[in-house]
Image: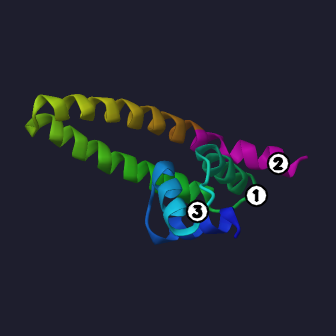
Amino acid sequence: MSVPLTLLGLLEREPSHGYDLKRDYDTFFGRGKQLPFGQVYATLGRLARDGKPASAYLDTQRAAHIRRMQELTELKRTGPLVDVLLADHALYHLEADLRWIDLTSARLADLAEAVTNR
């Protein structure tokens, strides 16, 4: 089974985080051999390099991260202290992911040009 096509198929279904893509891949297709996290991101990088819809992936990732951050922020306002601490932890990770997504999105055109000029 082609990992790139499978990941694109999973993304076609719904916007997903890299963690969600790995989980869904493993659930549906990973019997006996799970997909390493690094392979998810490496595959998405190759898709971007090859001009596949990686920019659309990054856009959906960004939107999904923002929605999740809104949910966690609400939880911080209304939840017990344990949930607040867990929400803080998740928010810091999502914030770092968003910074990476923004930086990568800004560099996609440069990446495409560098790959084309090889």
Position of 87 with respect to 49 (left or right) is left
Marks 1/2 in contact by CB < 8 Å: the verdict is yes
Q: Which residues are magenta?
A: 104-118
Q: Residue at x 61, y 61 (%)?
A: 32
Q: Could you say where residue 45 lies in the image, as x and y percent from the top left?
A: 68, 48
- Separation (CA) of disc 1 from disc 3: 25 Å
> Which amino acid is tagged 1?
Asp
Q: Residue at x 23, y 46 (%)?
A: 71
State the residue position of label 1: 50
- Separation (CA) of disc 2 from disc 3: 31 Å
> Which amino acid is tagged 2?
Val
Q: Quadrant of residue 74?
A: top left
Nearer-the-camera pick, 19 or 77: 19
Position of 18 with respect to 68 (left or right) is right
Q: Which tag, 1 or 3, sits closer to the chain's start?
A: 3
- Separation (CA) of disc 1 from disc 2: 8 Å
Q: Quadrant of residue 81?
A: top left
State the residue position of label 3: 30
